[in-house]
Image: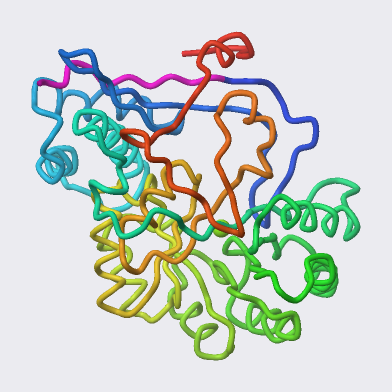
Amino acid sequence: MKITDVLVHSFYLGELERPYRNAILTTTAKEVTFVEVRTDEAVTGMSFAHPRERETIEGPLRDRIVGTSPLHAARLWHQMFTGWRKPVVKGDAISAIGAVDNALWDLRGKIYDQPVSVLLGGFRERVPCYAAGGYYETDKGTTGLAEEMARFVASGYRAVKMKVGGAPLAEDVARVCAAREAIGPGVSLMVDANNAWGAVEAIAFGRAVEPYDIAWFEEPCWPDDLRGAAEVCRSLDMAVASGEIEYTRWGVRDLLSEKAADIVQADPHTAGGLTEWVRIAALCSAHHVPVAPHGNHYVGAHAVAAVDNGMIVESYAGLHAWQDEFFAPMTITDGELVVPTRPGLGIEVDFAALERAAKSTR
Ligand SMILES: [Mg+2]
């Protein structure tokens, strides 16, 4: 079997009725993008991509792997990573490699008739899963936040995450207090600052929310302020989670050597794909650091289920309820996600519905 083509498919589905923001970015549109790897046999691989990765995927990455066997994961990753004037270990080229690598794993799963989690290590079949949300929205207030958090718990989650860092400190502390009251004492609560702060502000905030039993404090400091994050780790009793915008094993190596995270959140797409993610997980394991990947649960579930230090999967299913129309729902029971057992990544997409709903496609 040989790879014959690599394509990116984007579906723009219109503007959100209620745009939402974290500390640094506002999301306004509904959009889904896939990468597809075609072969000379009747099987294709598919995973998620970002529209900005199209040029790299359909250009240099396609050229590096077309005509070769899709089976050899390490070799294909090496082919995609090397051969540039200077292979860079950070940036969009790496996440483009990640998108193709994940589609190749979906393809291998279909070829071997096994879920990707099993091909990557197969440590377990169910994984803890948390609901990511708690964004800032116009007129949402602490009441809207509390209702959202309670809704996540009612739908089966035992862990929820909310945004901080996008409002004055006292307001954020009041939001955290409202969220904790809404979910009760038995549910884990995480807070995510999306790199909004310096170490001094982050430590002040961390101390202020200590009474609310925070399971982890995510990305407290400016992206490359590893020493600042390390200072936050040392100063607070709560765990610091970080690494969702880190790339490759070399990026995570620096995070670990600076002791800038107690939990590593490398994203199986952004960090370079599942091939690289499993290496990152092993590196973290050698440092006794658990991995809790950022990103969608469709890929994240396979990552966490594959390795012995997989902690928990992130899910945006509650936040992106509009996707229910296009994606088959996952099963959440007692806070755990049942990892799909279908061959490959097991992502079930209604492409006909996507085509009908799309305002534009490519
Ligand atoms: Mg985050």
Q: Is residue 125 left or right of residue 43?
A: right
User: Residue 24's spot in the image, x, y percent?
Assistant: 64, 53
Q: Is residue 328 left or right of residue 147?
A: left
In front of the other: 358 or 91: 358
User: Residue 95's spot in the image, x, y percent?
Assistant: 35, 43
Q: In the rendered view, would you say 127 is above or below 43? A: below
| Residue at the image point whose x is 14% and y is 38% from the top | 76
The overriding secondary structure of the stretch rendered in magenta is strand
In front of the other: 227 or 262: 262
Q: Give the magenta range.
A: 1-11
| Residue at the image point whose x is 38% and y is 45% from the top | 269
State which quadrant residue 34 falls in.
top left
Q: In the rendered view, would you say 85 is above or below 225? A: above
Q: In the rendered view, would you say 30 is above or below 265? A: above
| Residue at the image point whose x is 55% and y is 71% from the top | 221
Q: Is residue 336 left or right of residue 54?
A: right
In front of the other: 353 or 140: 353
Ligand 1 is found in the corner quadrant, namely bottom right
Q: In the rendered view, would you say 215 is above or below 160? A: below
Display colour scheme: rainbow
User: Residue 45's spot in the image, x, y percent?
Assistant: 29, 26
User: Residue 238's spot in the image, x, y percent?
Assistant: 59, 83
Is residue 166 on the magenta stretch? no
Q: Is residue 140 left or right of residue 331?
A: right
State which quadrant residue 237 falls in.
bottom right
